[in-house]
Amino acid sequence: MKFPKTQTLKEIAAIIGCHYVGADDFPVEGMNEIHVVTPGDIVFVDHSKYYDKALESAATIVLINKEVDCPKGKALLISDDPFRDFNTLTKHFRPFVASNASVSPLAIIGENTVVQPNCFIGHNVTIGKNCLLHANVIVYDNTVIGDNVIIHSGTILGADAFYYKKRPEGFDQLLSGGRVVIEDNVGIGALCTIDKGVTGDTTIGAGTKIDNQVHVGHDTVIGKKCLIASQTGIAGCVIIEDEVTMWGQVGTTSGITIGTKAVIMGQTGVTKSVEGGKSYFGTPIEESREKLKQLANVKRIPEILNKLK
């Protein structure tokens, strides 16, 4: 998430009430999670296991809960609770603003786009030309939808990321300030849920077609011309490259990559990254030919036991 204008280190420290290491006027352009940071971004870290990863990342401002040596060319924000303060910044720069209209006057809707009754279109939403949103589609604030997109009834774009920190008193939510971006010529079935990024974008690539009752987690990037069948659940921060096919009831773990033109057969549990151009099946996931051979051999076990007797 980029800020509307460049902030200074001193200004950011004042918002969250912490001290800092670096020049008062050190530029701060935005804030992001570690897998999508760029120079000018703030990244937060609150566990020693990830200190080095955060300090060595592309982010030039590190919100951290320990005084450490500041890498050259970077700045530090020293906080007793970086998770809390990251949320404070999200609320400051992208606060929730209630709407009193079904279609926000701040939304931009393109030529020849049809929005059926009982849809909700939030603030700062952009929808392109020749789209069709069937009844009861919900589009949260800041969502971007391209041209020639069809979205069926009951689908929700832009709900919060499923991202929590466990504290003694319960689960503390990491607030979501990101977006959903739907590119041109995408089709989305009924009752799908696509969560927005925590600070970045959840993206559905051009020409991709999604069946009914599919869930896409926060910050996931789905490539162009993919096919995703019903009841598939895709976790957060997954990269699905172009022309991937995922059949029904596939589930994935987070933070993995599925390569270009891979085929994931129904009910597969994608527990790790897989190469493109191959077919996969089973849990844990394996190439489908190998998995099917194993299942055929399992069927022969009674016959083998009888021979041993």
Image: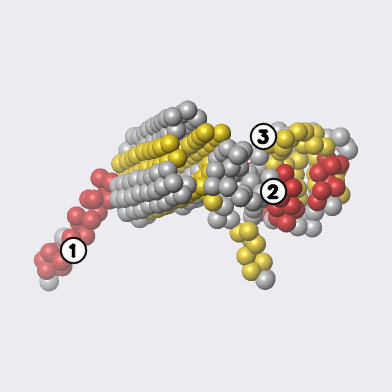
- Residue 189 point in image, percent of width and height: 37, 45
Q: Is residue 24 left or right of residue 124?
A: right
Disc 3 versus disc 2: nearer the observer? 2
Viewer-proximal residue among 12 and 190: 190
Would you identify the image quadrant in which residue 65 lies?
bottom right
Would you identify the image quadrant in which residue 123 lies?
top right
Q: Name the residue under label 3.
A: 38
Q: In this view, does 156 lie to the left or right of 101?
A: left
Dot 3 or dot 2, earlier in sequence:
3
Which amino acid lies under the numbered mark 3 shown in the image of this protein? Thr
Dot 2 surroundings within 10 Å: few (below 14), some, or many (20 or more)?
few
- Residue 32 point in image, percent of width and height: 66, 42
> Residue 93: in sight, yes or no?
yes
Dot 1 surroundings within 10 Å: few (below 14), some, or many (20 or more)?
few
Dot 1 or dot 2, earlier in sequence:
2
Which amino acid lies under the numbered mark 1 shown in the image of this protein? Ile
Viewer-proximal residue among 43 and 140: 140
Q: Name the residue under label 2.
A: 95
Q: In which quarter of the image is the N terminus?
A: top right
